[in-house]
Amino acid sequence: MTESEAGRGREADPKGSRPGETEGMVSFDSELHVGLVCGRAVALLGLSRTGRQAHGLIDLLEASPRLDRDAVAGLLSACLAATLPSGEEAVGLQWPGAPGLRFGIRRASAVSWVLSVFSDDRLANGMAGFDPLTGLADRAMFEARLAAVLDGPPRRRAGSAVLLCDIEGIRAVNQVLGHAIGEDLLRAAARRLQAAVRDADLVARMAGEEFAILQSEVEEPNQAAALGERLVALLGRPYLIAGEAIVVTPRIGIAIAPADGRSKGELVRRAAMALNETDAEGPGGFRRFSPEMDRRWQETRALEAALRQAVQEGTAFELHYQPQIALPHGRLTGFEALIRWRHPERGLVSPAEFLPVAERLGVMHQIGTWVLQEACRAAAAWPAPLTVAVNIAPAQLESGRLNEDVAEALHLSGLTAARLELEVTETVLLASADSALRQLVALRESGVRIAMDDFGTGHSSLTQLRVFAFDRLKIDRSFVQDLPAGEDSAAIVRAVAGLGHSLGIAVTAEGVETQEQLEQLCAEGCDAAQGFFFGRPVPLAKVREMIERFGQSARPPATAQALT
């Protein structure tokens, strides 16, 4: 059979495609009526229950989600040509719309023919269609099969779901136990995924630790939800790899066609939106796409674009300053600099809203450098010895340039190093480990003070105290807000204050809002405090007024109420 006789197909290398090596067969007659469906034809073609019961070859091929319209037309043309008196046998036929499959056609008897189905032998070498690490389909095959499902006849378009699965924890395994263990873990997760779905479903590894499932025969949304729930439970069970018990966290986003999207890109994108929002429900779990997610996604894209422009122009940010008070006398010692973004439409945006976006966009180093320079410039005009505290982002330490950035900010402003305090969280320290500690040691030796922010909320805060001599510990506001009634919070505040005093480290309590909280903190021995009770963050233009109202002399804490 020539290429023209095989429709739009093309002959591939017939090596390894002899009839005896057929993986699946479909018999048919001259009218293209189906006789037997044998071997792995059902699995290779991904036939649903309806497809398996098809009486005609046209219906059977159209029911395959792995064949697009061109591939179906080519196969039908080749089968019809084979039934002609001059028809010849053919092996190794391939179409772009049938990824990973080859076909052969031969006469079985005087009145019947056989369509043979092979898996492409190139796939065993990871050259096309399959992920070489896990043996699952790859992104290209997944997208091709999804496109074929959505591009098929109307009766084949309904009842499909895309489930995107991200397995958190594999990167940590790579870092701690090595990449070989991480690869074994990926293979184990792939086996669990494959075992949890039906023959007609497709499991693919998209990239890294992200997998995708194309679920067929979805008549009700709860069927996709049931599969998502089953996969979360299955993937979340412990793995025993090389003698190590490993637990990971699966998160799954679901989009169902046609309700959630009618195109390949739309379905995958909306499944990704649902996947991203599983974080809001705690570790692990699954969510289905909803229109509200699309609205939030559009808002996020707009926010990202505006933030990029703000960073580029450098004129939309401003710093507000919150007073820091020495206890028990209520003396003003300095201010913490807190960034704000003046959005052209939304007005003043808090750092909790836009800093996570800045980290995701990779612009935190630029923002952090601007904050350092602006805060030092402002503090240089305050009466000495008032200090300024600046929060340091992970990106600033990861860049390896924090020492140079601080030195430049001090030089440009004329502020002495002793009047600058850098606040770092445990997360910041863990992000760059040894490199972070080296930079902080050098900064402290230069005279800059270093504080640990949000103390008590991390899992290894005490370890950090052992490896670095901080100048200050800042008790997280979550422990202060329960005072004075919360006995557990009072015990923690008391313990941290005692720990700080034994190590020669000053202790500051954040989030002070009431006189009762202040009195409790003084009783527990805290050295300093800040919060709305003393004053809300104010723009630079109002700092001078706040300094004058506090004055430099000792005052009873109660007088601070006038500033609220």
Image (tube, grey):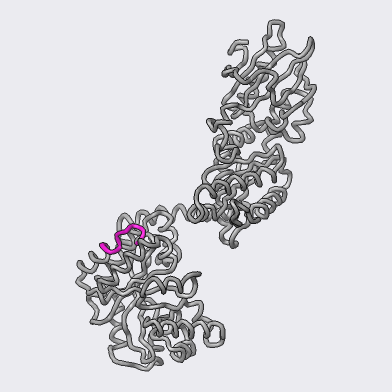
Residue 529 can be seen in this image: no
Give the residue drawn at x 79%, y 23%: 36
Residue 110: which quarter of the image?
A: top right
Q: What residue is at 54 percent from the left and 33 percent from the top?
A: 126
Q: Would you say the magenta stretch is mainly helix, strand or loop?
A: helix
The spot of residue 254 in percent (x, y) is: 62, 49
Of 499 and 545, nearer the camera is: 499
Apparent side of residue 149 relative to residue 132 in the rendered image (left or right): right
Looking at the image, which is closer to me, 405 or 290?
A: 405
Q: Quadrant of the N terminus?
A: top right
- Could you tell me residue 68's position as x and y percent? 62, 28
Instruction: Tell whether position 493 is magenta.
Output: no
User: Would residue 403 be counted in the magenta stretch?
Assistant: yes
57 to 369, vertically: above or below: above
In the image, residue 294 lies at what x, y percent? 55, 52
Question: Taking 363 as reference, is 229 left or right?
Answer: right
Residue drawn at x 72%, y 31% is 42
Residue sitting at the far bottom: 556
504 left or right of 478 in image: left
The image shows residue 187, relative to residue 309, as above or below, that is above
Residue lying furthest front in this view? 243
Q: Image quarter for residue 422?
A: bottom left
In the rendered structure, which segment of residues is drawn in magenta?
397-404
Q: Position of residue 455 (x, y in %)?
A: 45, 75
Task: Give the quarter of the figure containing the C terminus.
Answer: bottom left
Q: Is residue 93 visible?
A: yes
